[in-house]
Amino acid sequence: MHRGSTGIALEPHPDRLLPSDPAERSIARRLYDSVRDLPLISPHGHVDPALLAQDTPFGDPAGLLVTPDHYVTRLLHAHGVPLHELGLRDRDGHTAAPREVWRAFCSHWRFFLGTASRQWLEGELHDVLGVTAHPSAATADALFDELTERLAKPGFRPRELYESFNIAVLATTDDPADDLRHHRALADDPSWRGRVVPTFRPDRYLDATHPGWPAALDRLAEASDVDTGSYRGTIAALEQRREFFRRHGATTTDHSAPDARMEFLPEAEASRLFDAVRSGEAGPGDGRLLSRHLLGEMARMSSEDGMVLALHTGVDRNHHEPTFSRYGRDTGHDIPLRAEFTQALKPMLRRFGTHPVFQTVLFTLDETVFSRELAPLAGFYPTVYLGAPWWFLDAPRAMRRFRDAVTETAGFHRSAGFIDDTRSFCSIPARHDTARRVDAAYLAGLVAEHVLTEDDAQEVLRDLTDRQPRKAFRL
């Protein structure tokens, strides 16, 4: 029996996230049951491929469930827990011991009530790790010991968990200068039966506004053996690394830009800008203009080599400078911005919107553009797919708002299914399960309203779970 956070048992309700109306709930159960055991397609995430290549056992629950998950650490930080007490290492090397991290997590468990993270954490703890007691200050030490012992047993190594999660394909996110040795190790291992593919993430080589851009280009030159001292050389180096990634299974390039605007400058102008920025003699705005042009070059390359261009825009990265200075990037304080796509994408779509090879998946953190801009764009351009609600929006009610906003204009089949976008390995099945439940509940409502037949809804749910992510990301 499920008793809630103050009771004894941790047991997620079998009907969680399904409709409260009994008739709709019965439909949703049948729909969910039709896809609950389908393989997981993970076309965008941040799991380190070394985890699976090396297959090193997890040491403790804090390092598995707390420290790598910025959804968890950012909310605990909001409740006054310093990040180094959650396992992050500051610039002076300070960090807390795993047991202390776990105690901080358990003693603040109630603050996750109502959040999407609570859904995922309960799934990780109960369904993946077999925990039956709620985390709390009183249970923290016993749970830490129980889980540390369990993680050392057969069945809980990374590869064994990968198989138990029923993952069909897992895409990682990789620097273009990476030698992909962990991907090669997996591909060459006859005992490995999974599929892990790299994703080309060239942000640091396209952002000409960043002080570290010249040094990044030097690294790119070393990896590609192509001189990046000129504009033409840099473009050649990027093309060479894209081809290297493609040979190792990559199907997608992933971009996090301040906005979606791209420029397509004549080569002479792009070369002049490149030289000015590279030498430190650029004028105001030149770095941003060059960055937008380099992003446009990624679109041009995608139209030639067929790699899908996934575009994540509208984030103020490292919003709290003191935290960034002390702990570095990806530590939970990236904040959404207002977005605009219709005018920003017009130069790109003029060139590639109906191109037979080009394909793009658009993500945003601004819900206001779902129905106003993104759905109409995807409802016309055959090359445009709508990325799933991402990051702050990958929560149950936000996912429902997305379906409400885009479906009547673009239908279900211009969306890219679901992405888990996680660094926390054990959250992958929990996040996918949440998405399947949410979509089953949404479709059950349409069946109850006689907008869809149940057979239609079941087919759509299978598409959203399996076919659409494969198609949108060319997997």
Image: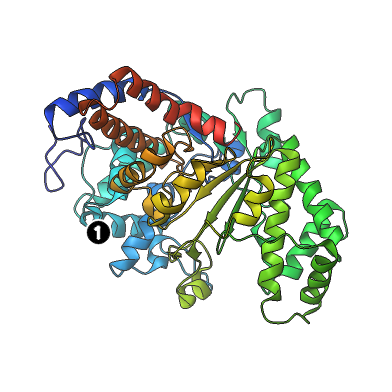
- The percent position of residue 50, horizontal first and vertical second, equals 60, 43
For the point 13% across and 41% down, which residue is it?
A: 8
- The percent position of residue 42, horizontal first and vertical second, equals 50, 36
Q: Is residue 133 above or below residue 114?
A: above
For the point 23% across and 25% down, which residue is it?
A: 450
Task: Tell me the element at label 1.
Answer: loop
- The percent position of residue 140, horizontal first and vertical second, equals 26, 51
Depth check, front residue: 394 or 197: 394
Quadrant where the C terminus sits is top right
Depth check, front residue: 221 or 193: 221
Determine whether, in the image, residue 272 is placed left or right of residue 113: right
Q: Is residue 154 visible?
A: no
How many C-alpha atoms fall within 10 Å of the one at disc 1: few (<14), some, or many (≥20)? some
Depth check, front residue: 227 or 445: 445
For the point 81% across and 62% down, which residue is it?
A: 266
Q: Is residue 86 visible?
A: yes
Depth check, front residue: 124 or 28: 28
Identify residue for label 1: 108
Q: How is the image coloured?
A: rainbow
Q: Is residue 338 above or below residue 148?
A: below
For the point 67% across and 38% down, which residue is it?
A: 250
Q: Is residue 177 above or below residue 212?
A: above
Quadrant where the N terminus sits is top left
- The percent position of residue 15, horizontal first and vertical second, equals 20, 31
Quarter location, residue 276:
bottom right
Quarter location, residue 73:
bottom left
**Amino acid at dot 1:** His
Quarter location, residue 412:
top left
